[in-house]
Image: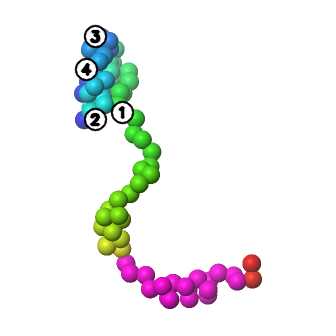
Amino acid sequence: MAKVIAQRELRNQNAAIMAAVAAGQAFVITRNGTPMAELQAIRHGRRTFVPRAEIRELAAGSPHIDDATFRADQERLVDQGL
């Protein structure tokens, strides 16, 4: 949940608030009691590396795919004349 702070508090405690944002805290900034903006850390895009253990964990819950049956289905469904 975002913490509500006044614009004045953001100005006066900028360094401490930015440190809190870096640590994961989100803020709603108000002016004269009216919410004006949200301040939160930027979420970075996709990871470039996924650990092998995590992939194994995710794959463990998925159904088994028989290679021969999968290949036969592809051969049957895909137009080989392309």
Q: Secondary structure at mark 3?
A: helix
Q: Is residue 76 left or right of residue 34?
A: right
* Depicted 33 relative to depicted 76: above or below: above
Identify residue for label 2. 24
Q: Residues within 10 Å of mark 4 (few under 14, many from 20)?
A: few
Determine the CA span between mark 1 and mark 2: 7 Å
Count of number-bearing discs: 4
- Residue drawn at x 55%, y 85% as measured from the top left: 71
In this view, the mark in front (3 or 4): 4
Label 3 – label 4 distance at C-alpha = 9 Å
Q: Earlier in the sequence, mark 1 or mark 2?
A: 2
Residue count near mark 2 (Cα–Cα under 10 Å), binned few <14, some 14–19, many ≥20:
few
**Residue 62 spot, x, y in % from top left:** 36, 74
> What stretch of residues is rendered in magenta?
63-80
Q: Are marks 1 and 2 in contact (CB under 8 Å)?
A: yes
> Circle 1 is placed at which residue position?
41
The disc label shown at residue 12, or none:
3
Residue 51 at what x, y percent from top left?
35, 59
Residue 8 drawn in magenta: no
To which residue does mark 4 refer? Answer: 16
Report if the CB atoms under discs 2 and 4 are less than 8 Å apart. Answer: no
* Chain-order first, disc 1 or disc 4: 4
Label 2 vs label 4: CA separation?
A: 13 Å
Image side of residue 6 versus residue 37, left or right: left
Left or right: residue 65 compared with residue 54: right
Three-letter amino acid code of the residue under disc 3: Asn
Are the residues tagged 1 and 4 within 8 Å (C-beta)?
no
